[in-house]
Image (cartoon, grey):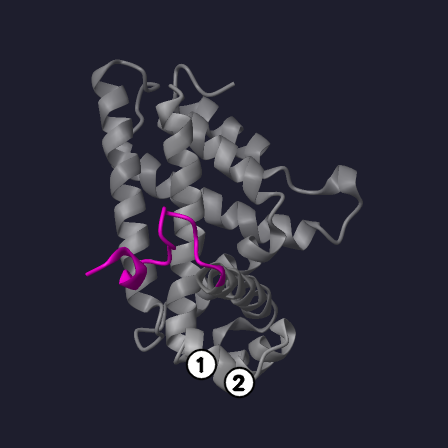
Amino acid sequence: MSETTVHDGTAPGGAPRRGYAKGRAKREEILQAAIALFGEVGYHGASLREVAARVGISHPGLLHHFPTKAALLEAVLEHRDAVDFADVDTDLAQGRSLFEAIVRLVERNALRRPVVEVFAGLAAEATSADHPAHDFFAARYRDTVSRMRAELARLGDEGRLRDGVDPAVAARTLVALMDGLQVQWLYSLERPRAERVDMAADLRAYLDLILLDPPA
């Protein structure tokens, strides 16, 4: 196959094709509109026609990118995780601990209200086994708790946990705390700034209870 017929989104020489870049930009715009709409009305209350209207394209135009609402939901969830995992991986590569990276992630989430809203809402909706995001969230919670438990167990082996801390219990508690803080933070945004929940500060306070060298 010649260079001019390679369908990888690049022109000869590796430059992005204009149409491909435009399509990627439109896909990103659709994802951002869906994040906002899912956060406002939930998955079941949202429609593809409303998402299409928000980005100024036709319903068939949206279906070209995402043929079903379930496909759009999957893309939204994968997009959120891709952004979060990239941030955490960058912090780890720079020498920060896992829990330092998590605190920094929580700080960033405080600047991304729509993303927090959609995650909090969908996580609650998806407890139903017939929800299209049920398997995603079930696997996400299982994997997240497992990663936290492994890290806490490693710290325990190094003598860096406070006395009496059970890594399995602390891992479940930590994940529950992070999710619960997101919900409380969203409600607190109606209050004066001084009275709003500081998710990162509360997370640091909990880590101080279980770790001998918590993130600063």
From the image, give the main secondary structure of the stretch colored magenta. Answer: loop
Q: Helix, strand, or loop for circle 2?
A: helix
Does residue 79 appear in the picture of this structure?
yes
Q: Residue at x 34, y 35 (%)?
A: 170
Does residue 7 appear in the picture of this structure?
no
Residue 206 included in the magenta stretch of the image: no
Stretch in magenta: 1-18
Residue 13 included in the magenta stretch of the image: yes
- Vertical comparison of 186 with 68: above or below: above
Name the amino acid type tagged 1. Answer: Leu
Give the labeled residue for mark 2: 59
- Vertical comparison of 44 with 8: above or below: below
- Vertical comparison of 157 with 38: above or below: above
Give the labeled residue for mark 1: 63
Q: Does the CB distance between marks 1 and 2 fall below 8 Å?
A: yes
Residue 37's label in the rendered image is: none
Marks 1/2: CA–CA distance: 6 Å
Q: Residue at x 40, y 35 (%)?
A: 88
Q: Helix, strand, or loop for circle 1?
A: helix
